[in-house]
Amino acid sequence: MKKGRLEAFSDGVIAIIITIMVLEMHVPHGDSIKELLPMLPVIISYVLSFVNVGIYWNNHHHMLYAAEKINGAILWGNLHLLFWLSLLPFATAWMGENHFAQWPVILYGFVLIMNGIAYTILCRMLIKEAGEGSSLAIALGKDWKGKSSVIIYSIAILLAFFNPLLAVGLYVVVAVMWFIPDRRIEKKVAGF
Amino acid sequence: MKKGRLEAFSDGVIAIIITIMVLEMHVPHGDSIKELLPMLPVIISYVLSFVNVGIYWNNHHHMLYAAEKINGAILWGNLHLLFWLSLLPFATAWMGENHFAQWPVILYGFVLIMNGIAYTILCRMLIKEAGEGSSLAIALGKDWKGKSSVIIYSIAILLAFFNPLLAVGLYVVVAVMWFIPDRRIEKKVAGF
Amino acid sequence: MKKGRLEAFSDGVIAIIITIMVLEMHVPHGDSIKELLPMLPVIISYVLSFVNVGIYWNNHHHMLYAAEKINGAILWGNLHLLFWLSLLPFATAWMGENHFAQWPVILYGFVLIMNGIAYTILCRMLIKEAGEGSSLAIALGKDWKGKSSVIIYSIAILLAFFNPLLAVGLYVVVAVMWFIPDRRIEKKVAGF
Amino acid sequence: MKKGRLEAFSDGVIAIIITIMVLEMHVPHGDSIKELLPMLPVIISYVLSFVNVGIYWNNHHHMLYAAEKINGAILWGNLHLLFWLSLLPFATAWMGENHFAQWPVILYGFVLIMNGIAYTILCRMLIKEAGEGSSLAIALGKDWKGKSSVIIYSIAILLAFFNPLLAVGLYVVVAVMWFIPDRRIEKKVAGF
């Protein structure tokens, strides 16, 4: 019951986040195909963020599916994650409009790191509530993927000081890493 | 359970897509009725896209109603469809504001084709999961309507190089083709 | 099942419509309280539209609560209502920004009439599906309130040619008429 | 059943409110980190409003979880609360863009007071419907937190005439007061 409304609210917020990003793709004034070329970085940023938000939605979905109990702290842990997700459209638009310039790329990486941390915190809260031996705890395991994501994002931010495109490349690497389903975990928890 | 949240998330995204298109209808500065006349192409584009998104929502609703099992790949197949749907407000605004000029009309057709392809892919994924002899597979059949839509859209794009309004006319034809309910299929699957 | 998703989608669209209207209330550039005074017509228009959308949501809620069966035509009847509701933010913004000038007030009335008609059509569709002797048919009765609303809106539009504020006054009258609950009907259908 | 749709609609509206606030954070034109510094008041305002809306969502969630019966008046009491919540993005943007100037800070406090009052009214309606001896009535008790919030907001508005930052400080105090869970109440109602 409680979980249902938490899911519904999160779905609503994530659905809005994923969709309002498209509002930042401003319609060009001219009607020539040349108008679309300078939009390429905007479109690439949009695709990258769409995939990232999609990954969060999928994982959120799986995580809450396995969770059984929700408490007041978890509601806030969830809002904390949604807060950092809500900053993604802003960071996406800044990065796209400035054609992957240094500081926008760094801000984008920072928002991704904070999302990763917020996700891990929510994860820990759910495991704590479910108990260490719960199927949720086993499914999430050592969370090497979450930890390595934060490390790769940090490296990306450092690289951005030399070449921002290298950082963007690493953001894509992490997205691909999550996009390819983790078969091992899927097998461990039936129904996951 | 899993299907419920997939539906809820899709409903949220589609509801937002269908509604934010109206945000692209910029309020005219003057207060005369003449201000509304140049908006006519914007309004027509809005109606066309509203009907198209409505068609996708209806079909998505029917398709998932008949589906029984969902897996991780289907979640992404669904996000892929939502991605192309999310580009419709952008294409709609560009086409409307440029009064059905050539390239905006072509882009609109391209987005419609990609939506059609994404829908077909999702369809195939659901049938594969349900099994070839399932009621879902029988209901969707050979999907002649989906295939002919993509063909007509392709012809429309070619025609747009000569006269963009012909292309818009074909977009309307496809919308009408879907709008008129397919009695044959409705009979085949009770409850559809 | 089917009804649930129809309700969820409608809730989503109506929730977005009611909320995006506030996006049309552009934040004034200065920081003085005087900046808010010229916003008064915008705020009044917003309140009027918020109440109108609220009325539609409440009635939609009651109507579908009593309905039992949904078919493909009803899905479109519902989308038709949502289409006209989606034009309300545009009409609201045009009316508010032009301080209740003649044509914006007329357009607003026109959108209200079309909403009233779309609601009546949906109502008839649901009654037809449920059957003439159904509790839904009895609850909705002769729909004198729906019919008189459309008549009052039509009178309001005519009056707007002489004095737009008289029209706005009549829009308020209809909203109050719906806002005050119809005890008679509430008694007829328990649980309504 | 009825409660479910009330919750779903409220979730939708609150999800949109919490998310559209981020649309008011306009993307800076330059790509330097210096561009973000003048955004600090905008970001602080966003965080404050995000937390406030989060608090309302959490409490709304708890309140309706304990409620059993819903009537037509409660639907309007709920819409009344959503109306005042919907003004928060506007007040947030005005306050942030004007760097906590006097009148925007006062308006923000006014909107918070009205939200508090609307919440209390909804609360009373639900208790009246549930009965004075109901678990809902016991859980909400004397609502000292709600009452003291309104008093602190009123003091904040008075202080804003001398120093607006003092008022903002008090807004933060109230948010913290609600953020720290009320253990006493959580114990009283199991499942709350």
Image: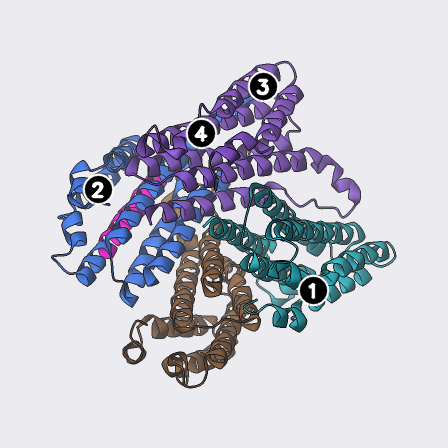
Chain colours: A purple, B cyan, C brown, D blue
Kind of residue at disc 3? Ala
Query: C67 or D139, which lies in front?
Result: C67
* Residue B66: quadrant of the picture: bottom right
The residue to which callout 4 is attached is A140
How far, Cα to Cα, is label 1 from label 2? Answer: 54 Å
The residue to which callout 1 is attached is B175
The residue to which callout 3 is attached is A156
Q: Residues within 10 Å of mark 3 (few under 14, many from 20)?
A: many
Q: Is residue D59 left or right of residue B122?
A: left
How far, Cα to Cα, is label 2 from label 3? Answer: 45 Å
Kind of residue at disc 4? Leu
How far, Cα to Cα, is label 1 from label 3? Answer: 46 Å
Q: In the rendered image, is residue D100 in sight?
A: no
Q: Quadrant of the N terminus of chain D?
A: bottom left
What secondary structure is marked by label 3?
helix
Q: Quadrant of the C terminus of chain D?
A: top left
Residue C190 coordinates in the image, percent (x, y) = 29, 75
How far, Cα to Cα, is label 1 from label 4? Answer: 45 Å
Camera-side mark, 1 or 4: 4
How far, Cα to Cα, is label 3 from label 4? Answer: 25 Å
Q: Residues within 10 Å of mark 4 (few under 14, many from 20)?
A: some
Residue B159 coordinates in the image, percent (x, y) = 85, 58
